[in-house]
Amino acid sequence: MLELSGAPERSAYDAVVVGAGIIGLACAWRAARRGLSVLVLDRERPGAGSSSVAAGMLAPVTEAEFGEEALLRLNLAALERWPEFAEELAAEVFYRRSGALVVAADRDDSEELLRLHGFQRSLGLDAEWLTPSQARRIEPGLSPRCAGAILAPHDQHVDPAAVMRALEGQGLELLAGDAVAAVDESGVRTRSGRAISAGAVVIAAGCWSGRGIEGLPELPVRPVKGQILALRRPAERPLVHHVVRTPRCYILDRGDGRVVIGATVEERGFHTAVTADGVYRLLEAAWEVLPDALELELEGARAGLRPGTPDNAPLIGRAGPDNVIWATGHYRNGVLLAPITAEAVTELLTGEEPPAELAPFSPARFDRKPVAA
């Protein structure tokens, strides 16, 4: 990545991408591969938002929620694109087709997961109900109290930090530390007063996308705090072979000694402090199903802000000024949706038709009056 400290290299760009998280960089990379000139702007630095805290779940089946069938279809389409996306990055991103196991810690969990399994099967998803003994057979570290589990063999995971490093290595132009203050038909103006001409502006600024930029509609994108724990196990002793989830947490093993436990969901505004309560609740939830997790070395804890929307679905497409394309509001699915979002944005930039699965997620469903000067 070519990080600029002064004026941009060009007098004008085909596209300016606002936001250097995994969504913004993926959009910029795809557009540049199609021959467009692209500049990425970020208020801080690459990955400073939720991308640096995300666990990297690629899990549409175990993320499926009642009433979110359209989002499920989008997530499944995104998962299909991940093998090629990972290969094209040409770097180790710890992409693992591990499968996922949603574990019931007790009878109450079991009743809830049986309902979820019925919903998954009604949609034709590949999900199998396992008895406690079957679950412990494939994950021997599970607690004896385990009351059953759902096996989703095609769910996967990836390391977002490694994906970010790979995207940063693609030669993109970046101007960091200067937030965008205004957007108009000619391009953008930054807080420092720098004007940058662009044919199109892509808004991929996570939870900072929805407000405060002159000339853009105020869309209902809000910060949703998530805390996550990083642990380390002995190299020769994997904690789990699948992604293990419960109604209260998830645990994944990167395969190289790193273990991740996440994540809280908190409506705390832009508060990003790690709290004792958040750490305690995550460790307690992990212990319920994997007692050995508490024997691991705790390397640290972090908190980030997911970009949430009123319907928990992303905003991808045009709204507001004709030259503006939105790619934000991905909530818990930003890593999963990065390839298909980048594809859709690039199709819009080049005048082509984005994937059909994106149709329900136009930001026009929340379009509001632009912010005045």
Image (spheres, rainbow, N blue to C red):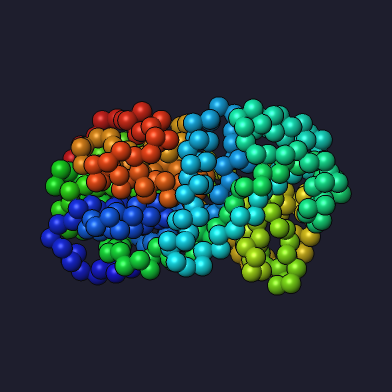
Q: Is residue 270 visible?
A: no
Residue closest to the eye, 41 or 111:
111
Residue closest to the eye, 277 or 220:
220
Residue 162, percent across and down?
49, 64
Q: In the image, what residue occupies the spot 36% across and 28% down?
A: 365
Q: Is 347 drawn above or below residue 88 in the view shown?
A: above
Residue 265, percent across and down?
57, 43
In the picture, the quarter occupied by the C terminus is top left
In the picture, the quarter occupied by the N terminus is bottom left
Q: In the image, what residue occupies the spot 12% across and 60% down?
A: 11
Residue closest to the eye, 80 or 185:
80
Q: Is 58 drawn above or below residue 253 in the view shown?
A: above
Q: In the image, what residue occupies the spot 78% across and 53% down?
A: 138
Residue 191, percent across and down?
23, 55
Q: In the image, what residue occupies the spot 77% across and 64% down?
A: 295
Q: Position of 131 compared to 163: left or right?
A: right
Residue 112, percent across and down?
72, 32
The answer to which image quadrant residue 328 occupies is top left
Q: Position of 136 compared to 46: left or right?
A: right
Task: Return the residue found at the far bottom.
Answer: 235
Q: Position of 65 compared to 31: left or right?
A: right
The answer to which image quadrant residue 118 occupies is top right
